[in-house]
């Protein structure tokens, strides 16, 4: 990783901010700075240049990150968030701040050190402005009922650029639950996670069902425990939805 002196407002020292430094700071206030991608910068597997920023986040902590192109730059910035241990990106955004600027909101599924990556789209290079800030924590987990009426708007947390609301349900090993989600405002998606694993791959997921943009799935619990039913969307959109659940004997 290259070492570059980034000027972060509100940060007394740069130690721990850029990916090459030891001892990562907790994100407790807005930070801003700038950088340049290109030349001898590291590249990811797709060949895109990137810079990494590491922060400690608490479970449930929400952040907003933005990467924008200043005047004179040719960079098309992309934002990605990686969890503790790396692996696949937990959130990503390209033009959420209006082309070519990237903007995303993210909720940490567990406590640990997260990487916020600013990378180039394709072979684009140039300067960027970067800002990251903590957001007010929202309680997004509620008890799952038979009929759950919800609405996506700016008061609802996002994973990347898409809204979500999590519902908690207790299931026995081998028990089936039928889930149906519908909306006239956006393309719905249902996901099911084991509690505490919301940052990983879902145990079950459905986007479109029955030739519509609504979702439905049948999930059988592999073991006794708490499961998270996530009502979300294929792409960012606001509006009302209904999530219906039927737990079979």
Image (cartoon, rainbow, N blue to C red):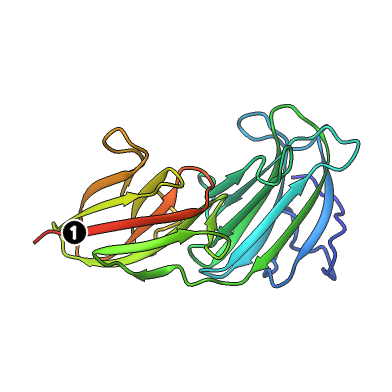
Q: Is residue 248 above or below residue 98?
A: below
Instruction: Identify the residue at horizontal 26%, vertical 35% (top origin).
Output: 210
- For label 1, the crowd category at 10 Å Cα-Cα, with few meaning under 14, some 14 to 19 and many 20 or more, is some
Residue at image position (60%, 32%) is 45
- Report the label total: 1
Q: Is residue 63 above or below residue 121?
A: below
User: Dividing the picture into quarters, in which one does residue 121 lie?
Assistant: top right
Q: Nearer the viewer, residue 203 or 153?
A: 153
Identify residue for label 1: 246
Q: Tell me if I can see residue 202 in this picture.
A: no
Residue 87 higher or lower than 194, as above or below: above
> Quadrant of the image for the N terminus?
top right
Q: Residue at x 87, y 36 (%)?
A: 73
Quadrant in the rendering for residue 148: bottom left
Q: Nearer the viewer, residue 127 or 178?
A: 178
Quarter of the figure with the C terminus: bottom left
């Amino acid at each position: 990783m290259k070492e570059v002196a980034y000027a972060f407002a509100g940060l007394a020292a740069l130690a721990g901010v850029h990916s090459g430094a030891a001892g990562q700071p907790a994100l407790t206030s807005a930070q801003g700075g700038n950088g340049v991608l290109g030349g001898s910068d590291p590249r990811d597997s797709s060949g895109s240049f990137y810079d990494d920023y590491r922060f400690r986040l608490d479970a449930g902590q929400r952040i907003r990150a933005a990467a924008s192109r200043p005047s004179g730059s040719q960079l098309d910035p992309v934002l990605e968030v990686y969890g503790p241990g790396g692996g696949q990106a937990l959130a990503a955004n390209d033009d959420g701040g209006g082309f070519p600027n990237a903007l995303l909101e993210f909720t940490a599924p567990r406590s640990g050190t997260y990487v916020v990556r600013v990378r180039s789209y394709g072979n684009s290079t140039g300067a960027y402005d970067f800002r990251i800030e903590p957001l007010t924590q929202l309680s997004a987990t509620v008890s799952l009922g038979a009929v759950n009426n919800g609405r996506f708007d700016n008061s609802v947390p996002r994973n990347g650029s898409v809204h979500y609301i999590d519902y908690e349900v207790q299931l026995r090993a081998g028990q089936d639950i039928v889930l149906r989600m519908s909306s006239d405002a956006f393309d719905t998606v249902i996901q099911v996670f084991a509690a505490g694993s919301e940052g990983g791959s879902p145990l079950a997921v459905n986007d479109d069902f029955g030739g519509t943009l609504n979702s439905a799935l049948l999930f059988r619990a592999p073991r006794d425990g708490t499961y998270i039913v996530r009502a979300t969307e294929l792409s960012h959109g606001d509006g009302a939805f209904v999530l219906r659940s039927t737990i079979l004997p």
